[in-house]
Amino acid sequence: MKRRSTALLFVLFFLLSGCVQPDKSSDMESPNVVHKYIGYVVKHKPDQLLVTAFSSNASQSEAIWVRTKKQYELGTKVAVEFNDGIETSYPGQAAAKSIEMIKADPPQGAVITAEDIVGRALNHFKDSSVPVVKVVEYLPSEKLWHVTLFDDAQSNHSDYVLNFTQDGELNK
């Protein structure tokens, strides 16, 4: 009898624990949450832009196909806001609430901007499925731009390094 009542209590506890409603704030996102994402425009499709970003702190990258009617040049750095969910495919997909260009002046000694150099580097990296800009830097002592990219669709993530002169010519 004691065994039977212990087993009954265990089953009853198990059944009741399944009836408890989870805390709604744990995994559910409020529909009013706005996501902001900063990255480079690396590909175009009709009504879509592929925007990728690399975090050197976490050594990881993100990629999102942004649905928008606006067109931006390859290499343009943008801040995208989404107010709906982001589809979790890779690359992710989402409709843009707003897109803001992030403009920067050329560094001292350089003739063109980092965005111009990224655009030129992407033109040399066309076979990539999901190009990610890892490093863009101007080296004033050498008068060179240094750009490191990789294809995030490839499992080995081999770096592709390009150097450009201060005025944007590929330095071979």
Image (tube, rainbow, N blue to C red):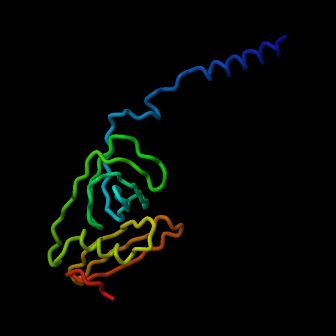
Residue 13: where, in percent of width, then height?
67, 18
Image quadrant holding the N terminus, namely top right
Nearer-the-camera pick, 149 or 42: 42
Rendered view: 8 above or below 44 = above
Residue 98: where, in percent of width, then height?
26, 48
Rendered view: 10 above or below 135 = above
Q: With 104 as the anchor, is 89 left or right in this view? A: right
Nearer-the-camera pick, 65 or 9: 65
Residue under the image location 39 percent in, 66 percent down: 132
| Total residue callouts | 0
Instruction: Spot the residue most to the right.
Output: 1
- Which quadrant of the figure has residue 141? bottom left
Q: With 127 as the anchor, is 119 left or right in this view? A: left
Nearer-the-camera pick, 63 or 60: 63
Residue under the image location 35 percent in, 79 percent down: 162
Q: With 57 as the anchor, is 118 left or right in this view? A: left
Residue under the image location 17 percent in, 72 percent down: 107
- Which quadrant of the figure has residue 112? bottom left
Rendered view: 119 above or below 35 = below
Image quadrant holding the C terminus, namely bottom left
Instruction: Spot the residue most to the top.
Output: 1
Residue 100: where, in percent of width, then height?
22, 53
Instruction: Spot the residue most to the bottom.
Output: 172
